[in-house]
Amino acid sequence: LKSLIGSNTDLVIDSLGRTVGDYLRMRGSAIRPKDAMKFLSLDTTLDQKGVSGSNVRVPDTGWNRTSKNKVSDQCDIDVIVGGMSRETFYNDYFMPGRPFVLRGMTPKTELGAFSKHRWSTTDRFHPNTKVSVGPTAYPSSTGQKHCKGDMTIAQLENATECPEMPGVPMVHARHPKEEDLKELYPMYNGNLYDRNGGWREVEHFFGPKPWEYHLGWQVFFGGDGSGATLHWHNAAFNILYSGIKQWKLTPPRYRGWTGMPAKAATEKVEEELDESISVVCTQRPGDIAYIPDYWGHLTLNAGFAIGAAVILPDDYQMTADANHQMTADANPRILFVHINKNGGTSVIRMLQNRCEDQYTSERWGNGHRTFHATAHSLIDHYGREAWDDSYSFALVRHPLARQVSNFFYLVDKCSRKYSDYCEVRMIPTGLDRKTDEDKIEAFHEYIWDLYNEYPPGSEKSYLFGGWGHGNEEFKTMNATQTSWMVDEQGEMAVQNVFKLENLSRDMNELGEAMPCLKHATADQATGRELKMTEDFGDEDDGGDGHLEMVHANASPKYPDYRLFGKNKR
């Protein structure tokens, strides 16, 4: 690098206008401060200073969380709370070769599947199940041997020693089979690529159909003080489900390999490795760690730790370049403000099927997701510049029709399974055998009760219009459809607003704004019906009729909404 640029660290070296100095200053840069100063006379020490915090307690997942070691919350690489766009991943981490941690992206149901209580209901991972163990994940790869006798998972949990290796914490690792995955991920029927799971980020960042490539999947667990010894390989993602994992990373220039157990290797590294060439980070349950190609790394577990990882082969990583180019060519990006009970699910399906390079689905933060994100939430997540560079639109609906549709959707949902959610939304029961007149009266009683419980201006006023979906953390959120479409200043932010009732007429305008939809308007012109169905899943999933807009719900059935407007109260 020095021979190419001399001492000019202000030289622009990429299409984003970034300089050599910008790359060197990125937190977690593969060129550490020692070498930046030695070869390029640039002091990046302060830029590379990590975020340090107080000691961290091992979270309670039912497993033994006792640890002999104090665990610091220090992290010298970026920790991103919530989701990350494909462009950000490609430009800021994949191309510069920087590690990072995603926090808050693993669903609670997935984390719960790895609790001790849940594993106690399984066969292959019951605490009494015996497994092979060793001083490292794969002993033969580092010139070591497995313990002669197998151990139960409960023994591993309590850091039981192997008789022939006293003082060495044991760990188990395996390449999971289909039967393993079905027990580990029952909510996805063993499908690691399920769109609701933590591993969806792999396909999101790199591209479609990862199952067509030979990805290297691993599952591992071990007691306090166990871990992975110093090694390196292709880029990998790692999700922690239980315990705490402390990472020590070295950039490719300083990568290494050892046969020592993790605890001994950690002590050796701390004694002899120059701290200026390495980075550390603490991984919590639910965190997704990305380790780029050829970065050396070792891990040390605090408490009983369970995790899984996937190693990405070169041919699959190359799809990131192709997908980035498709995304860059797709101008503009599409940001759809999906207001509840306004037919948005059908629009999203159309975008996913016809505009997959411009429209992406993500989750981030405390319950946020593109499926029901307000303009304020999307701007907060992507940034104002990205919002302004994108095409944004929303669907609105006659307010009475929206409330009627929402009411009968929730009545049907709560009749099948009544929960605390139904109590909060004040949903009546027993309407299935009532007359239309009784249903209309029940609706008016519901609206009156809801209005009195969550009046305009109250903290939870948004519940008069729908569930918060994480948007309630913003003060701009209330029960109105308008509140979904404004920025943090309360100003209208979406470029176009379409009425659900007129969507058939406005399809040509949508097609002009989003060329990927033009063949959708062609389908309409030739008479092929573009169905918009009312689904059952999340509250507010559905729409009415089809794109020619028949004003009646397919399911559940209820009286024409216009009959509900005759009550004067």
Image: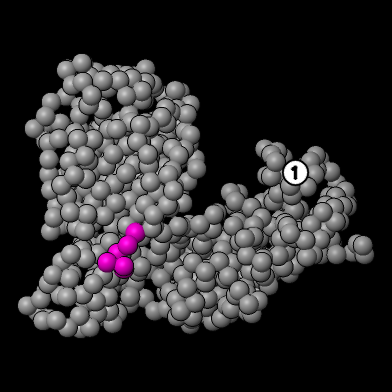
Q: How many marks?
A: 1
Residue at image point 33% right, 20% down: 155
Q: Between residues 256 and 209, which one lies in front from this camera angle?
A: 256
In the shown orientation, is residue 119 left or right of residue 279?
right
Q: What quarter of the picture does the N terminus occupy?
A: bottom left
The range drawn in magenta is: 45-50
Check the image and report above or below for 41 versus 158.
below
Q: Quadrant of the C terminus?
A: bottom right
Percent coordinates x, y for residue 229 in the rendering: 19, 39
Three-letter code for the amino acid on which mark 1 is drawn: Glu
Residue 77 picture quarter: bottom left
Q: Position of residue 80 (x, y in %)?
A: 41, 59
Is 79 magenta? The answer is: no
Locate residue 472 relative to residue 26 in the image: left or right.
right
Magenta-drawn stretch contains 47: yes
Q: Secondary structure at mark 1?
A: helix
Residue 314 located left or right of residue 445: left
Main secondary structure type of the part rendered in magenta: loop
Q: Where is residue 106 shown, x and y percent of the image? A: 44, 47
Q: Residue at x 23, y 72 (%)?
A: 43
State the residue position of label 1: 423
Say which quarter of the image contains residue 78. bottom left
Q: Is residue 180 visible?
A: no
Residue 527 placed where, x, y %?
53, 71
Q: Is residue 203 left or right of residue 486?
A: left
* One can see residue 117 in this view: yes
Q: Nearer the viewer, residue 395 or 284?
A: 284
Q: Quadrant of residue 6?
A: bottom left
Graded by Cα atoms within 10 Å as few (under 14), some (14 to 19) or many (20 or more), the crowding at tag 1 reads: few
Q: Residue at x 52, y 76 (%)?
A: 392
Q: Residue at image x 45%, y 57%?
A: 81
